[in-house]
Every structure is written in structure tokens, then in C-alpha cells.
Image (tube, rainbow, N blue to C red):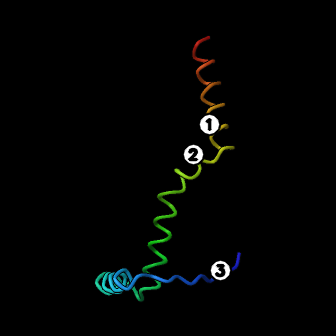
Amino acid sequence: MADEKMTLALPAALAAELRRLAAALGIESPEAAARLAIEDWTARNREAADVTDADGKYFVNQALDELIARQRK
């Protein structure tokens, strides 16, 4: 899959903090720091998003129902 380019407008204070943190952590640019932050946020929130997905929620509930039914036998 090809990379997709996105443009973000950040509040000045957030952009300044991103530049400061990138420099302090030795990250080559604020853009690279933003990408790392987005990757981290996405990874941490993927499970929560999957749980709220109606199809995924039904699958989990169905699997739990089947497990409970087997344990009761």
C-alpha cells in the first residue's frame, strides 16, 4: 500500500511543544514525532475501537455465550 499524505493544522502551542519534544528526544523532525505519536495512539486505541464495532461486539458476545454454555454442561 502506498503512503498517504495528510496535512494537519495544529494549534501554535501544540506545534511548539511537538518541536521541543522532537528536538529533546533526538527525533529528526516534528513531522516524524507527529507520525510516531499517531502510530502510538492508533495502536493503543485499536482494541477499544474493535470492541465498539457492532460486528466485533456480536462475535465476542457469541463466543462468550458459547464458552459459558460449555462450562455449564
Q: Amino acid at mark 3?
A: Asp
Whole-percent x and y of residue 58?
66, 37
The foreground one among 16 and 38 is 16
Q: Residue at x 36, y 82 (%)?
A: 18
| Disc 1 residue crowd, few under 14, some 14–19, many 20+, Cα 10 Å | few
| Disc 3 residue crowd, few under 14, some 14–19, many 20+, Cα 10 Å | few
- The first of marks 1 and 2 along the sequence is 2
The disc at residue 3 is 3
Q: Residue furthest front?
A: 11
Q: Which residue position is annotated with label 1?
A: 60
Q: Residue furthest left?
A: 24
Q: Amino acid at mark 1?
A: Val
Count the numbered circles shown: 3
Q: Residue at x 50, y 57 (%)?
A: 45
Q: Amino acid at mark 2?
A: Val
**Callout 1–callout 2 Cβ contact below 8 Å:** yes
CA gap, disc 1 to disc 2?
8 Å
Residue 53, relative to residue 58: is it above or below? below
Quarter in which the C terminus is drawn: top right
Whole-percent x and y of residue 13?
34, 82
Q: Callout 1: helix, strand or loop?
A: helix
- The first of marks 3 and 1 along the sequence is 3
